[in-house]
Image (cartoon, helix red, strand yellow):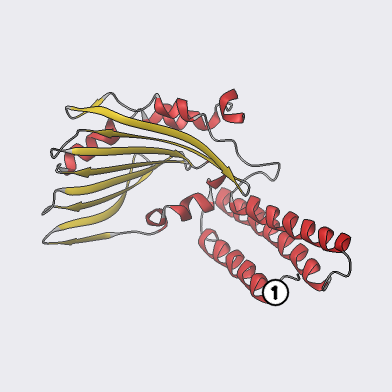
Amino acid sequence: MPIGKSALLVVSATLLCALQLSGCGKSKEQEAAEAFAAKMAEATKKMEEVSKSGTPQTPQEAMKQGADAMAAASTMIGAMMGGDGKGAVEPVDFRELKALLPESIGGLQRGKESGERTAAAGMKMSHVEARYGEGNGARLRVKITDAGSMSGFAGLASAGWAMIEIDRESDSGYEKTSTVDGRKMHEKWNSRDKRGEVDMIVGGRFIIEIRGNGIEMKELKQAIAAIDLKKLEALKNAAPAAAAAK
C-alpha cells in the first residue's frame, strides 16, 4: 500500500521544526541540526520513491515495498533519536542506575524498587524506580531514565518542559524551569496539598523524576541532591554492560 501525501507532509513539518529549534544555537548544535536535516531528507526521498512505486502487482513486490518503507522509517527514527546513523544507542544496564538510588532521603527509607530495559521500533531505553516512605505519611517516588536512543532532539521533546521556559505562580503554588550547574531543571509545587515534583536532565540523556506527597519542596530537592549526578553523567560515556546488550 503506497504511502500517502499526509505522511510526507508530516516528515517535512518535523524537519522544518527541528531546523527552527536548532538554527539559532551554537555551532555544534547547528552541525547537529544539519546532520539531522540530511538524514531526514534522505528518509523523505526514500518514502517518496516508495510512494511513487504504486500498488504492488505481486506478493514479492509487496514485500519489497514494505521492506523499503521500513528502511526509510528506520532512517527517520535514527535521525530523530540523535544517533550516529550506525545503530541505536545502547542504554546503560538498569542495574547501574539502581546503584545510584539512595538508601534514604530526608529520613524516608527506600522501599519498593524496580528496573527494566525496553526496546521497540528502534528505540532502546532503561529505567529504575524506587518509592520512599509508606502509609499516609510523607512519600516520595524517584525515577531515573536513560533515554538511550531517545537522546538528543527527541529526548528533549519527550520531556516537554525541557524545551520551554516556565515561570508562574498562584495562591496554591508555583511552577518554573531553571538551569542548575548547567542542567535543565523543572519544579512544580502545590502548597495546599503538599504535593510536588522536581525533574532534571543530566548529560542531555538521563532524566530524573521526583514525585512527592505530604512533603515539602525542600525535601523534593534533597532527593535530587542525594543522587550522584556526576557519576550518573559519567555513565553516558561508559561502555554498555553485557546485561544491557542481551
Relative placement, left or right, of 140 versus 151 is: left
Image quarter in which the C terminus is found:
top right
In the rendered image of this protein, does residue 40 appear above or below residue 181? below
In the rendered image of this protein, does residue 82 appear above or below residue 43? above
Relative placement, left or right, of 32 versus 92 is: right
Relative placement, left or right, of 52 versus 105 is: right
Q: Quadrant of residue 129?
A: top left
**Crowd tier of the residue under label 1, counting other residues whose Cα lies within 10 Å: few below 14, some 14–19, many 20 or above:** few
Residue at which label 1 appears: 4
Which is more toward the observer, 197 or 40?
A: 197
Determine if residue 241 is in view.
Answer: no
Image quarter in which the N terminus is found:
bottom right
Q: Quadrant of residue 148?
A: top right
Residue at (84%, 70%) from the top-left corner? Answer: 53
In the rendered image of this protein, does residue 183 appear above or below residue 160? above
Most extreme residue toward the bottom, as rendered? 5
